[in-house]
Amino acid sequence: MPADENPTMPVCLEITDRSGSREVEIEADTFWIGGPRSQCEVELDVAAVFGRVLEVARDDRGRLRVRAEPGLPFPIRCATGTIGARFESFLDGDVLNVGPALVRLRFRAEPASEQVVALDPGSLAAAPGSPVGAWYRTFMEMADHLEGLKSPGEMVPAAMAAILRATGADRVHVEMDEDDGPQAWFMSRPDDRRQFRVSRSLVEQVRASGRVVHVPLAASDPVARTFHSVRSEGISAAVALPISALGKNLGVIYADCTRDGAVLSAEDLQRVAFCARILATALGNRVLVRSLLEPKAQSTAHWALESKSPASAEFIERVKLYAPADYTVLLRGETGTGKDVVGRALHELSRRRKGEHPLALPAHRRDIERLQVSR
């Protein structure tokens, strides 16, 4: 493609520092963010830093990459981890924690309704090199505790308490879509279970998109600060994300701060996401075990799975195991080994045949169990 058909796309920076909030637009393939009087293209009002802080560049595909200047007095973090001295890919629209300042980078101006940061939960990874501290012990204790619990009414409060201990959140709310109707849990510091008002706008955005919503500082977000619940409850920061297991969205987990000026950082977001994943795994295992313990009236007997071959016994048991669950199953095998027959058996033994669990998520967004069909 000729150069004139692929013009440089401006990068918009939304900055919150000691001077307040502002937007800066840069039209360059590479530029530096630095401290006051650093002569960088973008300057931050950050204490104790006067030189270069962060370099932003585009790769040959036009994607953003960032790297930090060595020797800074604070780490630079985003939702995918800590930014080091080597260039690393950066999500368009993500937020950087540059010491006490927040910097959001995106390629173009977005519609007002999409100003809140939306991320794929699959992209949230633990920050490399993070020291092991109290949060690690909290998560290990939560995982061990969940292993011995049997119902959402016991599991959800355990996860909520872990979030309050391991993050800067003041309140946590969980909504679950149970078979007997929706259920909701509330928990505030230190251990208050009374109901409180959450930002329904953020919760409904997660329900509609199935993606993470992160508002690190509500006062600097042009959309979040207009929400009535944010103003009336004094919400200064919030995060909400889906609880997903076995290819199904089970509900939403929401956490916020109500202290004036409090912030939920990218690291807080990672920890909430990690707790949500542990909780979802425990809930998913409960559903899977319950499906295995159901009365024989719901037997998974099927003519296609009848065989006296010992070599086929394990394969048949795996088909029976995953047919009632909500996994996407990839069948592999040579031509003539019966992949179509097994696929039909999986469908006829699933809940979708009876319309009990309609689901239309792309395969790459769901758990996949691979079964090898052989002679």
Image (cartoon, rainbow, N blue to C red):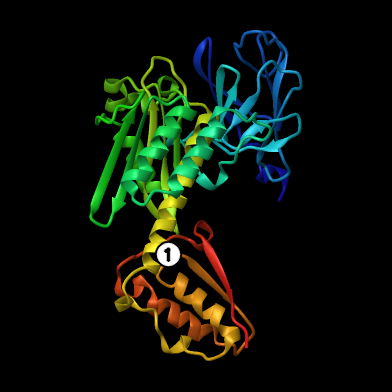
Q: In this view, does 46 lie to the left or right of 284?
A: right
Image quadrant assignment for residue 197? top left
Q: Tell me if residue 309 comes above or below residue 288 in the rendering.
A: below
At x 41% / y 77%, what residue is drawn?
A: 347
Q: Tell me if residue 184 comes above or below residue 353 in the rendering.
A: above
Name the residue type under label 1. Answer: Asp
Q: In this view, does 54 lie to the left or right of 217?
A: right
User: Does dot 1 land on a helix, a strand or a loop?
Assistant: loop
Image quadrant assignment for residue 173? top left
Along the viewing direction, whichever of 70 and 164 lies nearer the viewer:
164
At x 51% / y 63%, what residue is drawn?
A: 363
- The residue to which callout 1 is attached is 326
Q: How many marks?
A: 1
Q: Tell me if residue 199 comes above or below residue 319 in the rendering.
A: above
Along the viewing direction, whichever of 337 and 206 lies nearer the viewer:
337
Q: In the image, residue 292 lies at what x, y percent?
A: 40, 68
Quadrant of the snapshot with the C terminus = bottom right
Residue 83 seen: yes
Along the viewing direction, whichever of 9 and 73 lies nearer the viewer:
73
At x 73% / y 35%, what residue is drawn?
A: 87
Q: In the image, residue 242 lies at what x, y percent?
A: 41, 45
Q: In the image, residue 19 lies at what x, y percent?
A: 52, 9
Residue 113 seen: no
